[in-house]
Structures are given as C-alpha cells and as structure tokens.
Amino acid sequence: MPSERFTGLAAVLDAVRHDPGITQPALTERVGLGRSVVAQRVAELESAGLLAPDGLGPSTGGRAPRRLRLRAEAGYVLAVDIATNELLVALADLAGNILETRHEESDLGDGPEAVIAAVERMGDALLDGANARNNLWAVGVGMPGPVAYDDGVATAMPTMPDWDRFPARARLTTRWAAPIWLDHRVNLSALGERRVNPVAAASRHTIYLGGGEALAASVVVDGRIYRGARGLAGEIGHIPVHGAGDAPCRCGKVGCLEAVAGRSALVRDGRLLAETGQSPALAAVLARTGMIRPADITQAADAEDPAARALLHRSARLLGDSLATLVSVFNPDLVILGGGMARAQAHLLAAIRESIYRRALPAATQQLIIEPSAVDMEIAGVIGAVQFAVDGILSAENLARWLDHRSPAGRPDVADVQRLAATA
Ligand SMILES: [Zn+2]
C-alpha cells in the first residue's frame, strides 16, 4: 500500500489532469484532504516539475486563487495501436495531446516479430523527429487481442497462434528504456472514448463494442475496465450465436458471432451478393475494383440497394443479440458502438437497438443509452493508450516507486522501469 503522501500526490495529479486550470480551492474540495495538506502536495508536485501555475481564477472577495495545470511538456509518451491490418503509433505529451502520428498497413499474420519490429521502427522515427528519445516517460500499447494483464503477454488465442506468450512488454522495455503498459486494444479505445466523449465519461457502467477485424467488447464496471482472470472478459466474437449455422470461424469453431457478423464475414457475404448479382450496386463495385470492402456495403445500403441493406441488418441483429446478453449480465447504463460500426451507424444503430430491447430484460434497458462512438475510430485507441500509460506512471503505487529516485532528466528512473512495468 502506498503511503498517505503518495495517495495524496496521486489524488492531486488526478484532479488536475481531469480538470486542467482548476483553482487551488476547487482542488482542495475535490481531493477531500485538508487545505494545508493539499497546499503541501501541490508545492511538492510543483518542485518536482509535474504541476505548474496556470494564471489566476476569479476572486471571491479576497486574493484571486491560483489555477493549476499538469506540466504536459515535462515528458513524452508513445502510444501504439496494433490492429489486424494496420498500425498507428503516436507521440503525445503527458496531458495526452497527440503531437505526431505514423500510420502503416500491416498484417498480424506476419507474426509478432515482424509487427513489433515495425512498431519499433515507427516509434523510433517519432522519437528522433521530436528529439524525444531521452525524455520518454511511458509507452501504452493496444494489443490486437486479450492480454494476460499481470504478466504483460498476449493471452493464448487460437486466432493469433504466434502471439501466444510473445514477450512484447520485455522487448519494448529494452528498446525504449521506459515503462510499457499493454492492454487489449478494445479496452484502450473504450478509455479513449471516456476521455473524449462526455456521455461516456459520465457513465459508471459501460459496454463498448469495438469492431475491427476482431469483434470484442470492453466492459467498464463502476468506472473501471473489467478484464476477467485472463483478460478475456468481453470477448463476444467467439460466443456462438443463434442462426449462425455452421459458418466456420477463424478460431477453429463454427457458428461464432465473428464468423457471421465480423468484418471478414461481411466482406465474404457482400462478395457473394455481388457475384450472384443479388446486389447490382455491389456487382458494379466488384467489376470496377475487383474487391468488396465493408465501406462499399455501407455505400450500397446508403444507395437503397435492398440486398446490401438486408445484409447489414442481419449483422446488426446478430450483434444486438450478443450485446443483449452482455446487457443482461452487466446491466450497463451505456452501450457505445465503436470501430467500423460507427461508420455504418445509420443502418446498424436502429437494428442493434431493437435487438437489445427485444432480448434483454426490460428493466435493464429502461434507462440504457445506446449510442455510436463520438471519437474518430482511427485515433480512439492511441488516445486511450496515452491515458492508460500516464494513469500508470502517475498512480500512487508507481509514484512511490519512481518520484523520489528519478533520473536526472526528470523522467521515471530507468532502474525502476522493470519493476514498475512488471506490476502495471
Ligand atoms: Zn470463433
């Protein structure tokens, strides 16, 4: 357990991070410690270079109160989002402002060695471009599947055989000499949503559906991400669904949600509609481009193509049925549809809502909000990854490990990095 001193320091930092420019009296009220204790913690954080004054607030009679902000410029954070077909790496400051990004196409099938090597190359380029290599404080990494949270390796997933036990954290720690925080990318997208979208930030219990190649949900219980024993909570892509028949799934089973409503399934079924001529709009796309992408199906549906509409409607119904199960189990106040779903929202949202209302307990849906993501799906993951990594280094437990014995550059001491990351 961290001492009262570090609990207080972390509480002050947390309040300032969530309310930049907060006045010292408001901060004292928020943190709920005595005025002199808060003043002492603020002074300590100012001399440590973590907090800075930010002008004066409105006076309520006496002297105008000081405003405070996190010294975002004190250090850098790298954020990584590893999706099935693409990589996004971002350089950010400590407040989570994204300064620069790099994007590359990628293929998870090339294996972790090749993918992590690309991540390292992209991260190096960002660090060198900003001359930030010696002031990197932390790295947040969104992994393409579940993470065994306690030891920082990917959980065995039949869909990603080579990634099982690949020591991504140890590898990146060695490369960048900074603490590394790993999580399933869907959890980081959910964190990004909570940071940017006020509706998500206000929610205590949220189900966030991510939809890239892999369908997975992030489950937020009482304001915290619920991961389960092996990081597999919310893996709805591989729950069997009614009406899926024996569609083969890439996990080796049949009839999974992902096999009938995932991105690949959508492309497969859209292609079939094009080849058989059931969808004239998609047939035209296939003839012109030689392929069908999910966005083509959305466009065909927008253009009133009945077969494309029926296909999206069926996917939405199946997604909604599975989400209804999560709604019944977790009783959330908010369901957010992230990923590609947000793009096709006009076609999907109504059908997903209808399924959830039909299948879940009426009392569970009475005040349930179901909304598309308010965050640009490309960057939700890296926004969340920065937040996750900074939450990590500024937690009471971890401040106690590094704040008093930081390296001369001011960042978390490299000697503490391994211990720090091993308990993240
Ligand atoms: Zn499956």
Image (cartoon, rainbow, N blue to C red):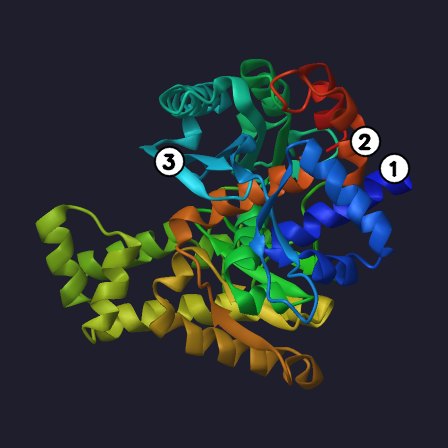
Q: Do the numbered discs 2 and 1 sit on residues whose CB atoms are within 8 Å?
A: yes
Q: Nearer the viewer, residue 79 or 119?
A: 79
On screen, residue 278 above or below 83: below
Which residue is labeled 1 in the image? 2
Q: Which of 137 and 369 is in front in this view?
A: 137
**Is residue 29 visible to us here?**
yes
Which residue is labeled 3 in the image? 100
Name the amino acid type tagged 3.
Glu
Is 105 positioned to the left or the right of 231 in the image?
Answer: left
| Helix, strand or loop at mark 1 | loop
**How far is disc 2 from disc 1 in space, using C-alphas?**
7 Å
**Residue located at (21% from left, 76% from top):** 304
On screen, residue 189 above or below 128: below
Give me the disc on residue 400.
2
| Helix, strand or loop at mark 2 | helix
Q: In which quarter of the image is the C terminus?
A: top right
Q: Quadrant of residue 124?
A: top left
Q: In which quarter of the image is the N terminus?
A: top right
Q: Position of residue 55 (x, y in %)?
A: 55, 52
Mark toward the start of the polypeptide (2 vs 1): 1
